[in-house]
Amino acid sequence: DKGTYPFYMLKEIDEQPAAMRRIVQTYQNDAGELTIDEDIVNAMLASDRIYIIGAGTSMHAGLVGSQLIEQLNGIPVEVHVASEFAYNMPILTEKPFFIFLSQSGETADSRQVLVQLNQLGYDALTITNVKGSTLSREAKYTLLLHVGPEIAVASTKAYTGQIAVMAILADAVRQAQGKAAPFDMGQELSLIANAMETMIDEKDHIHEIATDLFTDKRHAFYIGRGMDYYVSSEAALKLKEISYIQTEGFAGGELKHGTISLVEDGTPVIAFITQQNTAAHTRGNLEETRSRGAQTAVITTEALARETDQIVLPTVNELLTPLVSVVPAQLLAYYASLDRGLDVDKPRNLAKAVTVE
Ligand code: M6R
């Protein structure tokens, strides 16, 4: 039931802070420590390379997860689009471990890969929102998102839920590896829930920005580097999927190798600037588009903000910023679709779970 909300998508965006808190509580033991099933942690520890497989938004969550695992655990990670992996399987290492990400647990492209890997005798973990779903039943291990049912076709709380569960998983593996904690994961996820709330409280402001940026526009770009590039890909998918504005998420540095020729007078270009080591470069890339007529906007953190930046997030740990920076992008997409009078929850040609290959 969407209650007083006009669309499920807005309700599900709003539910994210509570979902973050629920995830932390669910994965906490009696002593208040985050824990993950020992067998899953051991399977990760025994692996020389993790392969993350998913489609659409779930694959984008996997990109962020790959950074979490590589940085906290030092295990190499590859992220694959399920429909590509199925027919062009990469050469696997000696001790691979597989993580399937799927909100519904029913995505045929992902299932196809899991069936193949099961036949080859490999173990896999499914991270899903739906208990008893096909991908959960067919994988050896499951971790649930606990974010509540997601109804809108555009995935929001499942994305942040998947990242949070992978963060808790990476933290548990780190502990088992005997590595010192760079920060307290439980505490940081709670701070993130608060930061998400701050963003959600700014919805009216974000609506104004959306109207200003996207009215009568047919194309748009999101840019960023590293983590910010991964969020750009997700932000672009969200916007294109429900507003029908053709949007691409680009690596900031790659723009000048071709794509910048598409920038015209008024083309919206939105930059994510949340990582200290790439902030100056992304600002430079955004400036290059502005000097060619782009209508630019910046999503940044308090720590890196400049006076003229449009959307400023509370500062959280850089590894976890996607959890917060994606929220204004979800809202921008929502309002772009709403302004156009579209059915936000049911974009044309799309199904919530894609059960055909
Ligand atoms: O249920 P899944 O997470 O496996 O679904 C994967 C994609 O179909 C899904 O994320 C899709 O890209 C969303 N509509 C994006 O908002």
Image (spheres, helix red, strand yellow):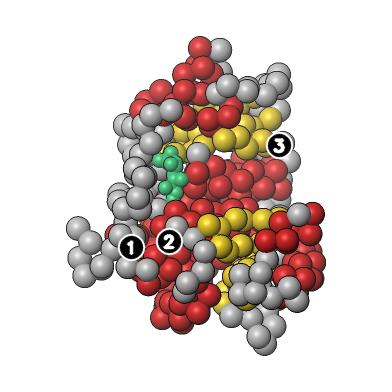
Q: CA distance from mark 2 to mark 3?
A: 38 Å
Q: Is residue 43 above or below residue 144?
A: above
Assess whether mark 3 and mark 1 are in contact (beta carbons under 8 angstroms).
no
The answer to which quarter of the image holds residue 241 is: bottom left
Q: CA distance from mark 1 to mark 3?
A: 44 Å
Q: Amino acid at mark 2?
A: Ser
Please rate how many residues cluster around mark 3, counting C-alpha atoms within 10 Å: few if below 14, some from 14 to 19, many from 20. some
Label whose residue precedes the other's in the sequence (2 or 1): 2
Disc 2 under 8 Å from ligand 1? The reply is no
Q: Residue at x 43, y 68 (%)?
A: 336
Q: In the image, residue 40 lies at what x, y percent?
A: 53, 32
The answer to which quarter of the image holds residue 251 is: bottom right
Q: In the image, residue 341 lies at what x, y percent?
A: 32, 68
Secondary-structure class at tag 2? helix
Q: In the image, residue 61 lies at what x, y percent?
A: 54, 48
Secondary-structure class at tag 3? loop
**Quadrant of the rendering where the N terminus is positioned:** bottom left
Q: Is residue 182 above or below residue 206?
A: above
Q: CA distance from mark 2 to mark 1?
A: 7 Å
- Determine which residue is flagged by label 2: 243
Q: Amino acid at mark 1?
A: Leu
Label whose residue precedes the other's in the sequence (2 or 3): 3
Mark number for residue 75?
3
Mark whose residue sits in front, 1 or 3: 1
